[in-house]
Image: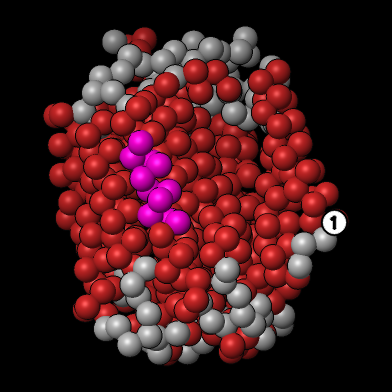
């Protein structure tokens, strides 16, 4: 069953669909960042090491990044609302397990399940909007979804800090359950079921598993190697990870129906935009992971104060991201995507001065404001460049790839950067003083790399790249889009 798109922004039905999609994807984006404020409390309760805390973050990102594209494919085949609801239920169960975790190992395992469930939610929530709204209102609906979902991510450290100080770090996970209950109720009552009737029923599970194996092997070695002293096992895992990732690329290139059509990367703009995404989001995740911990363990902030330190990012992005998108539409994305990462890098470099004895208003606040200004200038043009680089039929897969790149960038940053910067510690003795500044400078350098990629690859106007289609696909990947084109 496929419902022809006809919902309009501002109608009652449209609001319900957007609300369900925002709540569903919002808990995923929220849990990507809310846990950062809880890390010192988790370390204290479980006497956890820095490596353990890296796994609490990385386990979630590993499953999320590896299976995002597969999650979108499952929705196309079996029904977007059905997979969306299953993702919600899975995320609720995983959140409950996180909230009652008796050990850090149990918590890490539950976070992996959370990430896998999140991989069902994020792509299907966007697909629900795309397949239900009229073409002329689709961009506005997607804008509302992305803006509200982005706010949930930025509010994560602040909300997490408040819950930790008021009750316990466990509430950071348990709060998801009532939110998900509301999302399920709305989805069952107000969200029409849609699917791509022409989508192949062959899901590239092998591709997802090989990608997860490659990333998992590398991340395990990069986290556990520095923590316990490099061993031959760690070396073997690095080799296995690299070979698996190379094998994944070859597998996808030769597959008749791959999870990631490698032909999209022949577009210079698409590849460049994803390169910028990788560099900037790696730096951003390093900041979100390390700053909140550093402020609590080394500068004496409580969880709420540390989480609130990042609140200016939310405020500035709400105000200026739409304006940056409009600017990029007038002058092209190249200049904003070059200057924006440089500003993010400047703010990140300023954070290197955050050390015991330095006040919030002296260094942290101006650094965060600069970083927020750079993100506001970068994010909207970046998203637009990704979608503009492919034809409309493949906007969904392009978005899923870009989202996966952002999550994998965060995963690798959290795994690699602490070791490179020389950070360590266990339980209450967690100490980031010596290596925090180095970590921020490395993150700033990543932003400069992102700016260089944008300057070299992004153009003011770029012809839309027509993705090579496999025989199983119809002329239009989304039946809703096909019907509109036929009507035209």
Q: Is residue 259 left or right of residue 459?
A: right
Q: Residue at x 30, y 53 (%)?
A: 344
**Mark 1 = which residue?**
233
Give residue 193's position: percent from left, percent from top.
Answer: 50, 38
Residue 446, magenta (yes or no): yes
Which range is magenta?
Answer: 442-452
Specify how the rendered protein is coloured.
Answer: secondary structure
Residue 373 higher or lower than 99, as above or below? above
Residues packed near mark 1 inside 10 Å, few (<14), some (14 to 19) or many (20 plus) = few
- The image quadrant that residue 362 belongs to is bottom left
Residue at the extreme right of the image, as rendered: 232
Whether residue 31 appears in this view of the structure is: no
Q: Position of residue 67 (x, y in %)?
A: 63, 44
Residue at left offset 52%, top offset 48%: 409
Q: Position of residue 76 (x, y in %)?
A: 56, 32
The C terminus: image quadrant: top left
Residue 164, percent from left and from top: 46, 84
Classified by dominant secondary structure, the portion drawn in magenta counts as helix
Q: Residue at x 63, y 44 (%)?
A: 66
- Residue 358's quadrant in the figure? bottom left
Which element is circle 1 on? helix
Looking at the rendered image, the quarter that the N terminus falls into is: top right
**Nearer to us in this view, 402 or 79:** 402
Q: Is residue 173 above or below residue 442?
A: below
In the picture provided, is 185 more to the left or to the right than 419?
left
Q: In this view of the protein, can residue 220 be seen by the observer?
A: yes
Q: Say above or below: 249 vs 100.
A: above
**Residue drawn at 79 percent across, 43 percent down:** 240
Residue 130 sits above or below residue 58 on the image: above
């Amino acid at each position: 069953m496929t419902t022809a798109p006809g919902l309009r922004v501002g109608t009652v039905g449209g609001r319900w669909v957007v609300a369900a999609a925002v709540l569903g994807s919002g808990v995923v984006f929220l849990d990507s960042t809310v846990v950062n404020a809880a890390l010192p409390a988790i370390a204290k309760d479980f006497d956890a090491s820095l490596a353990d805390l890296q796994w609490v973050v990385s386990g979630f990102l590993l499953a999320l990044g590896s299976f995002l594209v597969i999650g979108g494919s499952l929705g196309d085949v079996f029904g977007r609302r059905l997979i969306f609801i299953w993702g919600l239920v899975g995320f609720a169960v995983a959140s409950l397990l996180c909230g009652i975790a008796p050990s850090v190992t149990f918590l890490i395992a539950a976070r992996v399940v959370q990430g896998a469930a999140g991989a069902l939610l994020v792509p299907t929530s966007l697909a629900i909007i795309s397949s239900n709204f009229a073409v002329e209102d689709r961009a506005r609906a997607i804008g509302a979804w992305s803006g509200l979902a982005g706010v949930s991510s930025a509010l994560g450290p602040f909300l997490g800090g408040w819950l930790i100080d008021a009750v316990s770090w466990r509430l950071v996970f348990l709060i998801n359950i009532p939110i998900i209950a509301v999302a399920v109720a709305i989805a069952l009552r107000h969200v029409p079921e849609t699917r791509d009737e022409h989508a192949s029923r062959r899901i590239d599970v092998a591709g997802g598993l090989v990608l997860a194996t490659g990333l998992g092997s590398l991340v395990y070695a990069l986290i556990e190697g520095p923590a316990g002293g490099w061993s031959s096992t760690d070396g073997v895992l690095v080799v296995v990870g690299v070979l698996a990732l190379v094998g994944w690329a070859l597998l996808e290139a030769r597959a008749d129906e791959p999870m990631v059509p490698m032909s999209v990367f022949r577009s210079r703009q698409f590849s460049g935009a994803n390169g910028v995404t990788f560099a900037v989001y790696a730096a951003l995740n390093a900041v979100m992971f390390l700053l909140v911990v550093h402020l609590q363990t080394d500068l004496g902030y409580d969880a709420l104060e540390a989480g609130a330190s990042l609140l200016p990012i939310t405020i500035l992005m709400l105000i200026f991201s739409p304006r940056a998108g409009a600017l990029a539409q007038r002058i092209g994305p190249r200049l904003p995507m070059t200057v924006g990462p440089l500003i993010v890098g400047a703010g990140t470099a300023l954070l290197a001065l955050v050390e015991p004895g330095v006040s919030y208003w002296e260094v942290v606040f101006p650094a965060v404001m600069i970083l927020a200004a750079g993100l506001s200038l970068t994010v909207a043009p970046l998203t637009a460049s990704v979608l503009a680089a492919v034809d409309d039929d493949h906007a969904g897969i392009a978005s899923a790839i870009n989202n996966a790149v952002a999550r994998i960038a965060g995963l690798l940053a959290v795994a690699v950067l602490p070791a490179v910067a020389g950070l360590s510690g266990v339980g209450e003795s967690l100490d980031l003083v010596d290596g925090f500044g180095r970590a921020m400078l490395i993150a700033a350098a990543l932003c400069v790399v992102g700016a260089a990629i944008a300057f070299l690859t992004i153009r003011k106007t770029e012809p839309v790249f027509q993705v090579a289609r496999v025989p199983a696909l119809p002329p239009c990947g989304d039946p809703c889009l096909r019907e509109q084109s036929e009507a035209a």
